[in-house]
Image (cartoon, grey):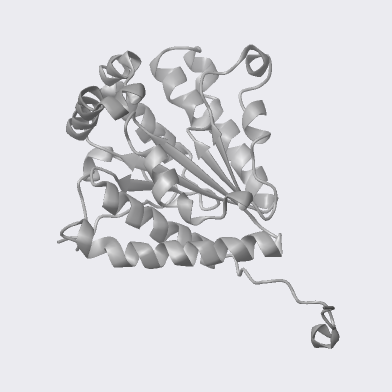
Amino acid sequence: MKEQPLTLPPGKRFRLKDFDPAYTGTFGNKKDAAQELQDNLERLHSLQEMLYAQGKHALLIVLQAMDTGGKDGVIEHVMGAFNPQGVRVASFKAPTEEELAHDFLWRVHAAVPRRGMIGIFNRSHYEDVLVVRVRKLAPEEVWQKRYDHINAFERLLADSGVTIVKFYLHISKAEQKERLLERQRTPEKHWKFSPGDLEERTRWDEYMAAFEDALTRCNQDYAPWYVIPADRKWYRNLVVSRILIETMEKLDLAYPEPPPDLEKYTIPD
């Protein structure tokens, strides 16, 4: 089986039809991947502890997907490995009156993690070139400029010690239908069902075009986009955990040096 890429070189166009959302690599099922995922979660816990203790780097994780794409699931099943004291999750919904009175990045910049912390964006500044574009909430001459603004913003963050990793959780339209049906049929999931999701589903092709442009125009060495096959939740979690480990291991994380002559200190009774 030909290995499916997870990202492309900056400047190369993303065509989502070239990425199979049901791809699972060499794994046949969830059981096959269980041990690696568990090992990865333990490694992520250790890496985050060093990130927090060192206080030199910040990590920003951006999650984007269609409705039911698995953003909440990734936060629970992968980022759940992190100590919650060192993590902040920000969910960007429709902007408030106060937020609309500022530039579109104002509310986003305020949520960027400080050094030593991990920030998770459940949706993000990319909504301003996705839903704003598809729902025509702003003129094209406005949202077209935002790709450059986003690149400049992320460059600023990267230059300031923030490592950025962006995940597009790629599900098929058929899989989305199954997940919506599950929400409709399962009493414990009724609260997740929104009629508005059905309206957004009718714009599927428009969203795919918007995602392709966002992935292509904002895929930079300092802030790469990864297309995660997400029809199989267990494989989605495995791949995200792999990429996070690879990203964090490049940061040269280490515990800070202990106080001088540590062994000479006497612990009082």
Q: Percent position (x, y) of residue 111?
A: 64, 36
Task: Say whether residue 164 is visible.
Answer: yes
Quadrant of the image for the N terminus?
bottom left
Query: Does the rendering let one see residue 11?
Result: no
Farthest residue to the front: give it: 269
Residue 118 position within the rendered picture, expressed as x and y whole percent measured from the top left: 59, 50
Quadrant in which the C terminus appears: bottom right
- Looking at the image, residue 91 sits to the left or right of residue 53; the answer is left
**In the image shown, does 116 or 18 lie closer to the viewer?**
116
For the point 32% across and 18% down, the residue is: 200
Residue at 72% of width from left, 71% of height from top?
256
The structure residue drawn at horizontal position 62% and vertical position 68%, both measured from the top left corner, is: 253
- 115 to 206, vertically: above or below: below
Pick the front one: 247 or 81? 81
- Give the x, y percent position of residue 19: 25, 45
Q: Position of residue 237 (x, y in %)?
A: 35, 52
Is 107 rendered above or below residue 140?
below
